[in-house]
Image (spheres, rainbow, N blue to C red):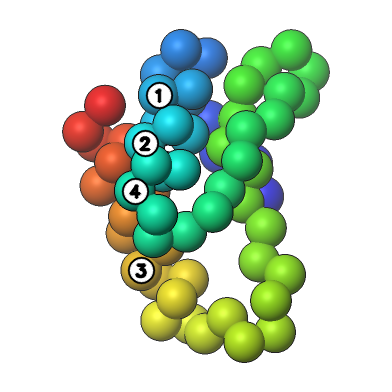
Amino acid sequence: MLAGFGDDARTARVISAVQQDGTLWAGGTTWRGRAYLRISVSNATTTEEDVDRSAATIARLAAEV
């Protein structure tokens, strides 16, 4: 899943904040010339609670940058 946060500079700040926070790992990518946060759940032990906590963290950090 890809998520953008307005312009590329803001998306880069969100990616950095997510990585520094440590709640989850998500990396950045470029698609069609635009920056995005790349989210992938690939661990079989990931729970719905983990996903909810991660989504809440991304939303909180995006609002703060």
Classify 52 as above or below 22.
below
Mark 4 residue crowding within 10 angstroms, few (<14) / some (14–19) / many (20+): few
Mark 2 residue crowding within 10 angstroms, few (<14) / some (14–19) / many (20+): some
- Quick one: label 3 or label 1, which is nearer the N terminus? 1
Distance CA(mark 3)–CA(mark 4): 12 Å
Quick one: SS at disc 3? helix
Mark 1 residue crowding within 10 angstroms, few (<14) / some (14–19) / many (20+): some
- Quick one: label 2 or label 3, which is nearer the N terminus? 2
Q: Three-letter amino acid code at disc 4?
A: Asp
Q: Which residue is mark 2?
A: 17
Image location (x, y in percent) of residue 30: 72, 23
Q: Are marks 2 and 1 in contact (CB under 8 Å)?
A: yes
Q: Three-letter amino acid code at disc 1?
A: Arg
Q: Three-letter amino acid code at disc 2?
A: Ala
Q: Are marks 2 and 4 in contact (CB under 8 Å)?
A: yes
Q: Residue at x 26, y 26 (%)?
A: 65
Q: Which residue is mark 3?
A: 53
Q: Three-letter amino acid code at disc 3?
A: Arg
Q: Are marks 2 and 3 in contact (CB under 8 Å)?
A: no
Image location (x, y in percent) of residue 42: 72, 70
Distance CA(mark 2)–CA(mark 1): 6 Å
Distance CA(mark 3)–CA(mark 1): 20 Å
Q: Which residue is mark 1?
A: 13
